[in-house]
Amino acid sequence: MTARDVVVHPDATVLAEAVAARLLTRLVDVQSHRRPVHVVLTGGTVGIATLAAVAASPVRHAVDWSGVHLWWGDERFVPDGHPDRNETQARTALIDALGDALPARNVHPMPALSDDVPTPEASATACAAELARWSSHGAHVPAFDVLLLGMGPDGHVASLFPGHEALDVVGATTVGVHGSPKPPPERVSLTFEALHAAREVWVVAAGAEKAGAVAAALSDGDVHDVPAAGALGLERTVWLVDVAAAQEVAAAPPAGQALWSAVDEYFSPLAQEDDALVTVRHNAAQHGLPDIAVTPNQGALLQILARSIGARRVLELGTLGGYSTLWLARALPDDGRLVSLEIDAAHAEVARTSLAAAGVAQLVDVVVGPAAETLDRLAAEGVEPFDLVFVDADKQSLARYLDQVLPLVRPGALVVVDNVVRGGAVIEPQHPDDRVQGVRRFAERLVDLPSVEATVVQTVGSKGYDGFALLRVKD
């Protein structure tokens, strides 16, 4: 199968908003490297809703529209201004709202039906000439930075329909289409040759009626049966779909990991990583540490909890590479302290290096050794009580850690225990995984503790299905 990225969104409305946000981000990113930027627009319900979402977004002002050129993947061959034209709908949704920010010369509609352009072929020829005028390095079309395509229930993209002769056109970038199974019958379309010149191709589809075509295209079906299978970009191909359209894709079940990861990505601007956080992750990966740290959204949750209770002293069980440690350390005041326990000396050294580079070393003590032994020592030393505890260590010992941690915290303290749902396996009394059994012993111990109020929050996200226990020590 040809490699494609598949991103699933909950419904068509969220899909349009997410595609708009993705497009604006892409435009800003590309403009930091090169100009002009060439974008191919699509029509259809979601395509036009995406353009309206771009117009409504405040991020649109971050784009220098004077350096953006707009094209279309296909067009209905009707007179200028006709409501069926993709161009007409795009002007209403976005182009008119941009006003003078987008120069008129940067908008390249496919020529409409007129006395001077009497046939789809005449329009295709004029469009091909305009494409060539803006191409470079001997190409016949610009190197489109983003080429948006809608997809019909029959699997067509642009105006390339199943079984139609336009599918086999070579040596041309545009084609006149007659006998379209979807009215109006006459159209103008880019050919596969032009589509394949795009750096990135984004196929956008929503609705249960398109589920079969989505599954067929992603399974590399024959382009004569499902033309969308041939929609491929030079550098990247992304399928942006909603749950209904993805329901027949076996490799990416809509109610599973693909959707959870997509939602994590959608909300990622709320918990943006800066360079220091990214460096901590990269350092951990480069030293071969397992990829089991919290996600950015989870790290932000820990930081918000610590700040909400005014935590000055934090205890962490399980440093790993220091990723969650950094999130927590940043919640502390200047005189705060975070004690992080790590059993592996090599992991601890990686964490210390990363935390020093992030500028929080003065707030953090990384202590090496078995957590149970270190907790006993802290109790014997009579350390100042902790305000928040984050437990992300071996699950087999959770019940023991709970008993050891409670004497080390103040009344009103919070204790967060990660990974206690185990993909739902925790409900199985005879489960063979000793980590699951460790969580079950922890849960049973919690029930017997009148000094603690607790709940468990189930979570889904880029790390899968799990959850955390949130405990509060009663005053």
Image: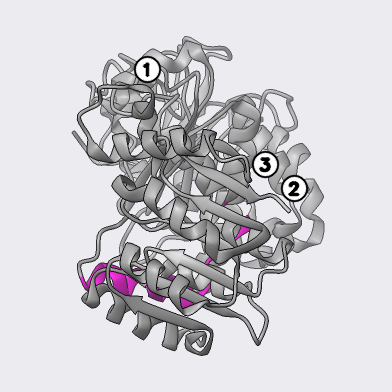
Quarter of the image that includes the C terminus: bottom right
**Secondary structure under badge 3?**
helix
- N-terminal of the two: label 1 or label 3? 3
Q: Do the residues labelled 3 and 2 touch (CB within 8 Å)?
A: yes
In the rendered structure, which segment of residues is drawn in magenta? Answer: 268-287
Say which amino acid is labelled 2: Ala
Q: Residues within 10 Å of mark 2 (few under 14, many from 20)?
A: some
Q: Is residue 188 above or below residue 404?
A: above
Q: Name the residue under label 3.
A: 51
**Secondary structure under badge 1?**
helix
The residue closer to the viewer here, 24 or 295, is 295
Say which amino acid is labelled 3: Leu
Q: In which quarter of the image is residue 424?
A: top left
Q: Mark 1 points at which residue?
A: 213
Q: Residue 264: percent from the left, percent from the top?
A: 51, 45
Quarter of the image that includes the N terminus: top left
